[in-house]
Amino acid sequence: MGHGLRRPHVVDLADRRALVRWRPADPEVLAEAERLKDAALLDFGLTESAVASWLYAKCHHQIATTAIDTAAVVSSGDGTCLLIYNPDFFVGIGLDGVKFVLFHEARHLVHRHLFADEELRADPVFTVAAEVSINHVALVRLKREELPLLGDRRIGIDPRTVHVDYVADLADQGLTALSYNDFVRTDLGVYAELKRMRFPPAPAPVCVHLLDGVLPGDQETIDAVGSSVLLNSLLWARRGHPGAESELLDLMGRTDGSSERASRIWGNLGAGALRGTTARTGKVDWWQRWLVDVLASKLRAGERLVYPKKRGAVLASLGLDPMLSRSGPERDKVLVIAYDTSGSMPPKVIQWLTELVGEIDRVQAHWLSFDAVVMPFKQGGSVRGGGGTSFQAVVDYVEGRTIVAGECFEEKPDAIVVLTDGEAPHVTPAEPDKWIWLITEGGDDWPDAHTPRMDCHRVRVPERTSTR
């Protein structure tokens, strides 16, 4: 925020170790900066920002470096995100300032996810509008009166100052300006009002990662991380996390309906349920989007060396040697899907889950129906059952302790999905973190309160059965 990258050293971004080695700060400063960063992220997770908390949980690399002056979230062509921050800068602005900067950077990634139009981002007025919108929200949500103070000056673009200039500019033209609250009501509303100015404000200084060619900003990575962050925040909101619901409702109010892309993203997430509406989209109910995200986390990718084309092209233009990255699935993932057929299982839910698994690439699926016993079947085959219910029968079969049709299950699954009404004696699998329980309407969602807790969600019969 507000300073910029030292451009001669941009090549160091290709090597994370080089970032750490670049003119390292004093050990005491590094330790204090890390303490401030961790304290800020802890507060985000507890109360202040579910969105920022989930974003930084996905930044597995958080690097202190003097190669940049401030901080940035970097999204590179190899599909990863990382947080880089200047330790002297963090120590200089203190805990409140660190919270503000980290919130600001998280919001920028979400902003770019929701508004990915290249023409829009190329407009310097939109750059200013983004800074105004994000800083206004940061001031409100973090309960700040002023922007962070570094030494004797404030850092970043003050939305109130921009509004004063906007009012004066429109008055000179004989036009009516909006009040401050109306001016900052929506993100694109700020942009539209700034475009009415005869002399819109210049975008400098700007966040370092907004400078094209300076920091990686791979849109594919931004979209993947952005969708996952919003989905997990939505899950927190639906489970009663303090502040998560109000933050998402505010973000939706600022962006939903402002563009076709933003509305489609919110609709695909099923976020309208937070405000009592359901978007008409090609996607099905929001719990199904949640399941896709959970499955993605359970079905861990293996590691293989690949050549990242986007980052490789940048390195080649700089005269550097290409670098290989570790990514992608190394093997097919093993998924077990178990249908409770002891009673009246909704056929639409079974059909949807079957279609979903069929659309996941590189997944080796094993299909089971069960009542008091386990009955494996082939995808598309008949599902049998009708007797009593035993979850233990499924656990014993998946963990290789029983023989069915003369065979023992010898695979090691990455995830086990059980579709059931939950009405049977409770069980504790050997690896509970691999189990996902989908409880039909009116059923017992005991896995959610079980010790240890397992992934669990109550589902309803969808009106549509295709995820396309």
Image (cartoon, grey):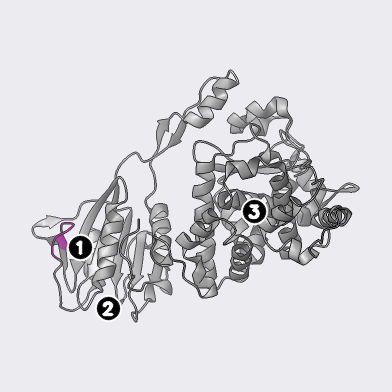
Q: Which mark is residue 424?
A: 2
Is 365 or 95 nearer to us in this picture? 365
Q: Is residue 384 left or right of residue 191?
A: left
Residue 80 seen from this side:
no
Q: Which mark is residue 107?
A: 3
Alpha carbon separation for disc pair 2 and 3: 44 Å
Alpha carbon separation for disc pair 1 and 3: 43 Å
Going by the numbered disc 2, the residue's amino acid type is: Ala
Q: Is residue 127 left or right of residue 333?
A: right
Quadrant including the N terminus: top right
Name the dominant secondary structure of the magenta segment: loop
Q: Residue at x 72, y 59 (%)?
A: 138
Tell me if residue 10 comes above or below residue 81 in the rendering: above
Q: Is residue 169 left or right of residue 332?
A: right
Q: Residue at x 65, y 67 (%)?
A: 47
As helix, strand or loop, the secondary structure at mark 3 comes to: helix
Tell me if residue 202 comes above or below residue 235 in the rendering: above
Span colored in magenta: 376-382
Position of residue 86 measured from the top left corner of the image (x, y, whole percent): 73, 40
Is 94 or 345 nearer to us in this picture? 345
Alpha carbon separation for disc pair 1 and 2: 17 Å
